[in-house]
Structures are given as structure tokens and as C-alpha cells.
Image (cartoon, rainbow, N blue to C red):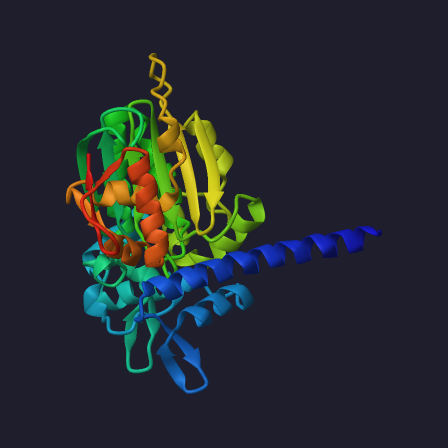
Amino acid sequence: MSRAEVVSENQGSQDRERNRQFLAVLERLKQGGMLAPQIFVEGEEGLHPAAAPELLLLACERPDVSGDALPIHLSSVSDLSLLKARDYMRETGGPGTFSDEDCFKALENLKAVAWGGDGWLPTLGGLLLFGKSPQQYVPSARVSVTRYKGGHIGRPVADKWLVQGTLFEIIEEVAYLVSQIKGYPLGSLRSFVAAIVGYRNYLLAADFVRVRIFDDRVEWECPGTLFALEEEWWDWMAGQCHVVLSAMAGRSLVEKSPAFSRDRVVQRLPGCRWWADEGRLCQILQDPNRENKPEQASEEMQSLNYRQVQALETWREKKYVTSKEYAEFNAVSIDTASRDLQDLESKGFLRSVGKRKGKGYFYL
């Protein structure tokens, strides 16, 4: 087999794997119905709300179109904070003062605004970076931070935060929280958090980033990635969030090259491990200052699937969950929900207090 044939075969394998992941994410979106309908794309009849298949097709066939440069319908330029935009422009080398006209020109160059037919509209990236209330349009642009007393989620919760705002504000707040608790360098954490919240496709991210702080490590889970860990996937993802990454590069939070250098983050934060699941990228930061042996999760805890872990976290305060609630939350059938909950019961995490479908489970 010639070198050209080998390259062609490898490329075909990569394309098939990418399409498989896209189809898996599309199915999850169809079940959960969480895709924001405000995203508009250009069609034969002009701008129209994009359905999930259109966005996936756009991501596959038009890598030159950045998803976060698409205009957000139902929004207006009044949803942008010109004060935040001016602060960014000054910090990245702009003049000391900006007129509104100059500010909009700078936002246009950054693709934070786009022409929507009847006037200027904020883009997805513009709202994430400079929005007054970004979560009004992008609910998944949040970070949940949970501090546990111990080494796994079966332990009591010491504290919990839900961080929101612009991506710049989220980066500062999350980096500060983790730095205060674990003692990591604040500057390195900023770059780490910037990579996590920046390298996301917010068109397809149906959940927010979750940070779990344990005694011996910090776990980060980032939905909305769609790709594995090979460098070409990072290159592709950089094209899907070009507006956000360009703005972050202006503040030296990420590399100015198209693809983010994971190695540099790993070097600056020792003990970092990465792995990928369909639609999610996960990282672990081991605590380099911990002298005691890390607490190991039980075999039962290690055997739980992602849906079960989410259930233990989500309904911890509510104290109970029914099969119907579990099924709707995870976009699965009642039968699948019942099997998951019965498995949690058999492992001692839940106690059944009802019978047949719709039965409730109380946490022990």
C-alpha cells in the first residue's frame, strides 16, 4: 500500500469517527430538546432558526464558519455592555477613550456583532464575552463548583457555587475559588479555566461545566466538545469558537495559534490528566501538595455510569428522585431510568420507598 493510500485510509477513518460522534450528539439533542432556538443561519429564504441537523452540517462542511460568529435572534445590541467592551479594548491596546461608533467597529472586527438583516445583532461570541446577562440566551455558559469533604461524590458537600456572567468573569471567579481552596498558582489556573470554557461549542453544549473539588484532586468536566484528544480535533474545535478564542488570546489567556497548546497547561499545572467521552472532555488536577494517601472511592462508586453520578449530585439537596424525573433529566426511557435507580439501590446509595413505575427513591 502506498503512502497516499495509507493517508487516505486514515483520513476516512477519522471522518467516520467524527460523523459517529456527531450522530451520537445529535441523538442526545433530539432526546433532550436543549438546543437554543435563537441561533439563526442563512438559508434559501434568508435567515431562519437553525435546527440541530443544520448546525451539525454547518460544523462538518463549513469549517470556515465559526459557530460563535452566528447572530443571536431575539437579542439586540442593548444586551451588550459597551463598558465591558471598552475595558477589553483598552486592555488589549486600544485608545484610552472610545466613541460608541468606534466601539461597534471594534466589535464588528472581533465578530462580536453581525448584521441581522434589520440591524446589528450580537453574535453568540459577543454575548459570551461582553453580554450584560449571557445566560439569558446561553444557559449552558455556567460553571458549577462543588467542594466535597473527602475523595469522592459519596462524601458530604462542604460548599457549592454556581458561577455565571461573561466568560471573562467566569474565568476569574472559578480560578480564584480553586486557587483559594487548593493553592494552585492563580495565573496558571486562569489559562486552564480559559481553555475549558473557551474550547466549547456552545451551540451544542446542553449542560454547564462541572468542577468537583476533592481533598486530593480537582475534577473538571466539560460538555460540548464533540471530539477526542488528538491534535487535529483541537484544530477543528478552534475553528468552532474562533471569536471567543481570539478575544481570550488578546488577553493572553490562551495561545495565539489556532490550536491551544495542552502541553503548556499540563507543564504549568503538574498532575493534570485528560480523557474524553462522547461530547465531553474531562480533566483531573492531582493535588501536588497533599502528603496523605488519597482516599479511594469504593468499587461501587467507581462502577457508576455518568447518569447515576449526575443524579447523586443533582438531587442531593432535594433528597429524592422518581423514575420519571430521572428519565426526563437524562433523556432516557423509563425502563433505563428504573434500571439505573435499581442499581443505585443495590449498591446502597438509594432506598426505595415506592412500587412500580414512578416510584421514588430516598438517599440514605
**Seen from this angle, which residue lies furthest right?**
1
Q: Which residue is drawn at 51% across and 56% down?
A: 21
Q: In this view, does 105 lie to the left or right of 231?
A: left
Q: Residue at x 50, y 69 (%)?
A: 57
**Seen from this angle, which residue lies furthest top?**
291
Residue 298: name its quadrant: top left
Q: Identify whether 117 is placed above or below 109.
A: below
Q: Residue at x 41, y 87 (%)?
A: 45
Q: Is residue 279 left or right of residue 232?
A: left
Figure quadrant of the C terminus: top left
Residue 291: image location, x then y, percent: 34, 12
Q: Can residue 218 be seen in this view?
A: yes
Q: Is residue 164 visible?
A: no
**Seen from this angle, which residue lies furthest left?**
318
Q: Identify whether 81 is placed above or below 190.
A: below
229 or 100: which is nearer to us? 229
Q: Which residue is drawn at 84% across and 51% down?
A: 1
Residue 149: image location, x then y, percent: 22, 25
Q: In this view, does 194 lie to the left or right of 314?
A: right
Residue 251: image location, x then y, percent: 35, 45
Residue 150: name its quadrant: top left
Residue 172: image location, x then y, percent: 26, 40
**Seen from this angle, which residue lies furthest front?**
355
Report the label total.
Answer: 0
Q: Identify whether 83 is placed above or below 60.
A: above
